[in-house]
Image (tube, grey):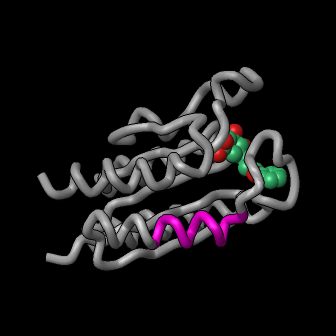
Amino acid sequence: MTLEVFILNGPNLNLLGTREPGVYGTLTLADIEASCRAKAAEVGFGEVEFHQSNHEGQLIDWIHEAGRRKAGVVINPGAYTHTSIALHDAIKGTGVPLIEVHISNVHARESFRHHSYVSPVAAGVIVGLGPRGYTLALEALAEIMSK
Ligand code: CA2
């Protein structure tokens, strides 16, 4: 069976590489997509859907689609991490295997970034390792999904 992964990015992550390099580094989302596609192929994913949206409902629709297709999900939910019960419910309701990624160390930042609605329904969380978090998440997800 072909392993499939959805790599989802939430609000403002389309701005990566253009501002706040001290917090988010200099790589663009297109750079991250390229390294994710290479890593996904290396660890055995036959299909990759890579998306970004500034809209909560669109992210939820992609999680539902991943669920229907029995795909795994790597998600950086951006600020929706800290606000979205709807995202929590979508992940719980579909049962998708999911890894949450944050480029910055949210725990070393403002207190409003310390709580995540996604973490309790994620298989794992990678925080503060920069864009490398995405490829580490793909390695872990491939292992989880092949069990
Ligand atoms: O560290 C992360 O990956 C975050 O998910 C990024 C979100 C933030 O709200 C989370 O607390 C942590 C923000 C993404 C905004 O990205 C920008 C990139 C460049 C310039 C401005 C924003």
Instruction: Name which residue lies at 74% across and 46% down.
Output: 24
Q: On the picture, is 16 further left or further right than 52?
A: right
Disc tally is: 0
Q: On the picture, is 48 further left or further right than 87?
A: left
Viewer-side residue, 3 vs 59: 3
* Observer able to see residue 53: yes
Residue 5: in magenta span = no
Where residue 101 appears, as percent x and y from the top left, is 52, 45
Which quarter of the figure has residue 128?
Answer: top right
Q: Is residue 108 above or below residue 85?
A: above
Instruction: Name which residue lies at 36% across and 47% down.
Output: 92
Q: Is residue 63 above or below residue 23?
A: below
Instruction: Name which residue lies at 38% across and 56% down.
Output: 138
Viewer-side residue, 60 vs 81: 81
Where residue 55 appears, as percent x and y from the top left, is 68, 64
* Observer able to see residue 79: no
Viewer-side residue, 118 vs 36: 36
* Image quarter of the N terminus: bottom left
Where residue 69 appears, as percent x and y from the top left, is 28, 74
Q: Is residue 13 above or below residue 84?
A: below
Which quarter of the figure has residue 29?
Answer: bottom right
For the magenta stretch, what is the residue range?
28-37
Where residue 117 appears, as percent x and y from the top left, is 53, 36
Residue 34: in magenta span = yes
Q: On the picture, is 36 further left or further right than 147?
A: right
Instruction: Name which residue lies at 52% across and 72% down.
Output: 50
Magenta portion: prevailing SS class = helix
